[in-house]
Image: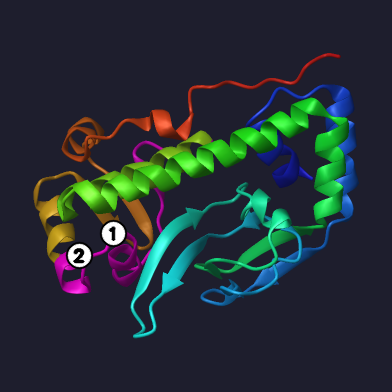
Amino acid sequence: MSPLLSAIERYSNLSPMDREAITCLREAPIVRVPARQTMLSEGDDPGGVRLLAQGWAYRFKDLPDGRRQIVGLILPGDFFDLGVRLVEEMDHSIAALTPSAYYAIPSEVLERLAREHPRIADAFARHEHVSASIHREWLLNLGRRNAFERLAHLFLEIFMRQSASGHARDGECDCPLTQNDLADATGVTSVHLNRTMQELRREGLVELKSKRLFIRDFDKLAQVAMFNSNYLQLRRETRPLTQ
């Protein structure tokens, strides 16, 4: 239950009754997926809501000529999309970046929880707001930041999102993205990405090795990327309610 409960508590102060109600999700099946396998393809029926329990996944869109754009990262504790319960087919694809596991939750179960427990409904709404905020920031990244700024910004987002869930410390966190993945996420060629990565290292800002991200100078990196973490809504603190 820990990933499910933590995912919801991250966005709302839950009462004991709310927490008890969430236990109904414990029967949701856990689906395990190997690395690089597509979980959902554009055009598929979503067939319910998914919450990532382990591993990393990413959203992507493909062009007919094979070019791919990664349009979002899904980290442990993230719902794939709460809104998919309202649509009949996916408008993008989702693939596992690493060996992953997710909860497959029937839409009607989440709808009942939201209907009967306003704080849980608030948590779902906040989750969707943060997801939309991240999409807007990625759009700004692709539209206005240069390659150096884009990559710096992406690394800071990865670090801050993991820091919020307790999976990053001392300027270090997981980063299983390959250089091709990073190129697809920042909209540049793999050659350009490699040059940009080398430039970040030369500036003493970032190092990427053994699937670990090392931020060497957070303040300077944030200045270069023009990074403002308010879109991630990390300042909000949640705590269990007593009644």
Which of these two is toward me, 43 or 6?
43
> Label 1: few (<14), some or many (≥20) within 10 Å?
many
Q: Is residue 167 visible?
A: no
Which residue is disc 1 drawn over? 186
Vertical order, 17 against 232 (above or below): above
> Label 2: few (<14), some or many (≥20) within 10 Å?
many
| Magenta-highlighted residues | 165-194
- Which quarter of the image is occupied by the C terminus? top right
- Which quarter of the image is occupied by the N terminus? top right
Q: CA distance from mark 2 to mark 1?
A: 8 Å
As drawn, the label of residue 174 is none
- Residue 91 lies left or right of residue 179; in this view the side is right
Residue at point 34%, 49% (across, down): 139
Vertical order, 154 against 9 (above or below): below
Q: Amino acid at mark 1?
A: Thr
Residue at point 47%, 55% (across, down): 73
